[in-house]
Image: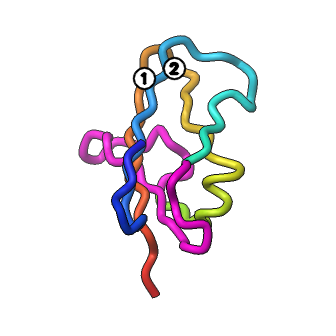
Amino acid sequence: MYVNEDKTEAVLYSYTLHPLTDPNYGLVKLNGLDPVKQYKVKEINTMPNAKNTFEESGTVYSGDFLMKIGLKVSSYRQESSVVLEISAVTD
């Protein structure tokens, strides 16, 4: 994961080589965000008109939630990936 200096944009790369069946597997805490900002999380590595593999794509979360709880970014598909754009929501 990479976060810009003013904590308004970030990108997360996740790769699933061998999926596990544990529902808690893959909770990734997104360190480096601003806990008081709201962030929209969007999957950006899909083909045009393809369905997102990241079910929560487009959802808004607090920075506090993303850093303390995290997101389930792993897949049940072997050798799959997801790239997420995390953007601060402006009022």
Seen in the picture, residue 87 relative to 55 is either above or below; the reply is below
- Can you tell which quarter of the image residue 88 is in? bottom left
Indicate the position of residue 62 as horizontal and vertical percent values.
61, 67
Indicate the position of residue 40 as horizontal and vertical percent values.
48, 64
Query: Residue at 48% across / 14% down in the picture?
Result: 17
Seen in the image, is 15 located left or right of residue 44?
A: right
Q: Which residue is under mark 1?
A: 80
- Segment tinted magenta in the rendering: 31-57
Query: Residue at 60% across / 39% down in the picture?
Result: 28
Query: Residue at 60% across / 74% down in the picture?
Result: 36
Q: Is residue 43 magenta?
A: yes
Indicate the position of residue 57 as horizontal and vertical percent values.
48, 53
Indicate the position of residue 64 as horizontal and vertical percent values.
65, 62
Tell me the chief SS of the magenta region: loop
Q: Residue furthest left?
A: 48
Quick one: 62 or 59, which is closer to the camera?
62
Q: Is residue 49 magenta?
A: yes
Q: Residue furthest bottom?
A: 91
Seen in the image, is 62 located left or right of residue 4?
A: right
Quick one: 29 or 85, which is closer to the camera?
29
Mark 1 residue type: Ser
Query: Residue at 51% across / 54% down in the picture?
Result: 32
Quote the CA–CA distance across marks 2 and 1.
6 Å
- Can you tell which quarter of the image residue 79 is in? top left
Identify the disc placed on residue 77: 2
Seen in the image, is 63 located left or right of residue 40?
A: right
Q: Residues within 10 Å of mark 2 (few under 14, many from 20)?
A: few
Quick one: 62 or 42, which is closer to the camera?
62
